[in-house]
Amino acid sequence: MLRSIGQRLAGLAGGLRVPGASMQRLQQRAASTGGTEPYIVPQPQFATPLARAEEKRPNVMKVVEREAVARADVDGRAKLFLRRAAPKDRMCAGDVVFVETINSMSDPSATTVFGGVCIAIYRRGIDTSFILRNLVQNVGVEMRFMAYSPLVKRIEIMQKAQRVRRAKLFYLRDRPGRAFQGKALRKVAKSQPPPPAKS
Amino acid sequence: MLPCLLRSCSGSGRLAASGAAFTRVRVLQSPLSTSAPAAKAKLPHEKIRYAPDVTELQPGTYTPQSQRTGVIARKKGMAAIWDEWGVRVPVTVLQLDAVQVVSVVKTSSPNHARLQIGCGARKEKNTTKPLMGHFKAHGVEPKAKLFEFPITPDAALPVGTEITAAHFVPGQLVDVTATSIGKGFQGVMKRWGFAGGPASHGNSLSHRVPGSTGNINPGRVYPGKKMPGRMGGKSATVIRLPVVKVDTAFNCVWVKGSVPGPDEQFVKIRDSIRLVKHRLFPEGASVPFPTYIPGQGPALPRELVARTGGRDPLTPAAD
């Protein structure tokens, strides 16, 4: 059943309680998004909730997390954080990891790269994150990445960990730089852009 | 003062002091009385009550002066979502569980209407007889939680109408009211944000105390002075929360930010009312008025996510 013209017009004028001057600013802001529909339908669509067959009355929050991770898992990166994945497929503390991030959604071609030793992984569903540590010009730098953020374009494991007996490697903060001089890290350092020249 | 003459209550001190007969002035008197107060007051059965007469659920026209009904939902927990700009938005998931209009409440003015909304389910054996009679009179299953919402008469809904998550428009602003988590008896630092005292430098026994409670004049403590006491466990309203997502399969509304109270608690959601500088519904949105009627209009997708819009926050402003 189509809505009447009156209802459509009422919808368009709905809820405006802003004086005239700021109305124009609001209209400009809305136009800058480019979209015509007032809402987005997330892709891929899950017409029926992602629930297991044995869940007769699925728990809302569990399904929310499952669907969010399934949606964000565009390139199979969820396997990196699955505890039951094969050791060569999953990310562990101590691996040398390379991450490429998009600077902003307006220009997806502009990316930043960073690589380092993974010293911590926080498995929290959609909020899964990990910390990479490296030495950049003799200065220790740590970066924490949200694994399922749309700004994280690519995560690659360059080298698997050797002789690491901990889940969190915060002791590396007190260690000399020798831990960050491996072959894989040097390869990662080469792929990073040179630092800006000092003026 | 002669106690034997003064057996009066409020307002008749002068009469008693003059030795007149003891009278108790009451606002409501018997209909047989001819005194002035009785002529003004109306007995309960004489008062006029109004309620909008709505029997069919029909789409209406939303105006900026209209006020739609609110709903009762359950707080399910918090999650996160990334918007179209790649910015992480923390959200609270609120689930509508069998939300129905239980009754149209009678009010004293034809311009003001109220709807009683019920949420959840309660077993008949756990419902008191008076409540059970109330539900049966309106032909509604016993509900776990009832609450009234003020509305404008054009937003009235017939009894038994089910309100779903599609009642809310993605991107609109809502106010969420719930009982905050009780914190028990708390000191002034936690309860009122006092700074406390210095941790060292000779401070004796006064690290978290309130300090002075007033001045030498008037020489007393004002009523309402902030002091330690029970904190939390009271109704709290968070205003102007944007609706980030509407899930029609689970009947959930995702609002940005946090909401008072623990998980599984009943919360009340209503369209925001303090909107001098804000816009209630996003530009170009069609407002389901008085509520979303299934079958009217195109079928909604299962999930509707609000557009954040505006400028890309991750690029520097060009100015």
Image (cartoon, helix red, strand yellow):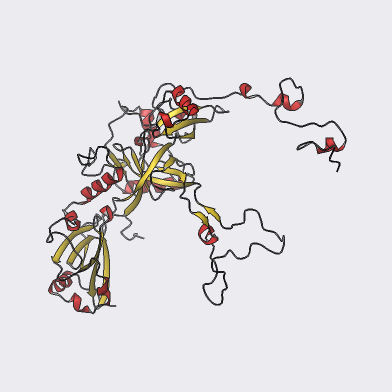
Q: How many labels were placed on the picture?
A: 0
Quadrant that contains the C terminus of chain A: bottom left
> Residue A167's image quarter?
bottom left
**Between B102 and B231, the one nearer to me in the picture:** B231
Residue B310 visible in the displayed image: no
Q: Position of residue A73 (x, y in %)?
A: 20, 51
Write the residue at 72% across / 60% down: B218
Quadrant that contains the N terminus of chain A: top left
**Between B150 and B152, the one nearer to me in the picture:** B150
Q: Is residue B236 left or right of residue A92?
A: right
Return the residue found at the far top: B32
Write the residue at 38% across / 29% down: B162
Seen in the picture, residue A151 relative to B154 is either above or below; the reply is below
Q: Position of residue B236 (x, y in %)?
A: 49, 47
> Residue B208's image quarter?
bottom right
Seen in the picture, residue B61 relative to A105 is either above or below; the reply is above
Q: Is residue B188 left or right of residue A133?
A: right
Residue B14 visible in the displayed image: yes
Q: Position of residue A21 (x, y in %)?
A: 46, 47
Q: Position of residue B223 (x, y in %)?
A: 65, 53
Seen in the picture, residue A14 relative to B186 is either above or below; the reply is above
Seen in the picture, residue B227 relative to A180 is either above or below; the reply is above
